[in-house]
Amino acid sequence: MIPSDHFVRFYNEVFKFLDSKPDGLADYYREIAHDQESHCLKIFTEKGLQGMYEYWDMIRFEENCDMDIKKYDDHIEFRMNKCPSLGKVTDNDAGPFERYCNHCPGWVIPVVEKAGFVCEYNIIDRFKPICSSKIYPKSSGRKSTIVEKPED
């Protein structure tokens, strides 16, 4: 098994390569979203926001993430305080892929939409390992978005 430090650096270089191909990253994100469905679509669909909370709470533990998760009646909020993946990529002499952070919303948004939800994903800063997202039922009238701005 490849150590996570090496895997993340490899992932970073794969993103650079795919970005040089027409629709390379878009195709890759679609494949990752499809693969992720086998891990979480059922719990997202059956348990809704509670299922999302359970899934990401497990990920928080497994990936050793400094992440806050809050579940409200009408949505769930995540704040990645120190993304272990981006942290490893920025500590890389090959240099981070400028849109490395897009791989998360690249798979999350299609899966939550398929489960009947929308995701507002805030990358915040591409070179600091922090981001946040809010997920609402589709019935909220909101739309899935990816934004990049510091939080207020």
Image (cartoon, grey):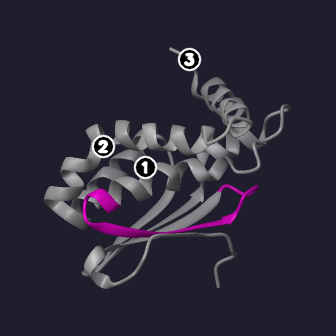
Residue 121 part of the magenta segment: yes
Report x, y in % for residue 77.
42, 71
Q: Quadrant of the C terminus?
A: bottom right
**Mark 2 — residue?**
37
Q: 27 above or below 80? A: above
Q: Residue furthest left?
A: 46
73 to the left or right of 95? left
- Closer to the observer: label 3 or label 1? 3
Q: Which residues are magenta?
A: 113-129
Which amino acid lies under the numbered mark 2 shown in the image of this protein?
A: Glu
Mark closer to the chain start, 1 or 2: 2
Taking depth in this image into account, of 62 and 101 the one nearest to the observer is: 101
Residue at disc 1, secondary structure: helix
Compare residues 72 and 97 and report the one nearer the observer. 97
Q: Amino acid at mark 1?
A: Arg
> Residue at 19% across / 48% down in the picture?
42
Sequence-wise, which precedes: disc 2 or disc 3? Answer: 3
Density class for disc 2 (Cα within 10 Å; few <14, some 14-19, many ≥20) is many
Residue that numbered label 1 is attached to? 60
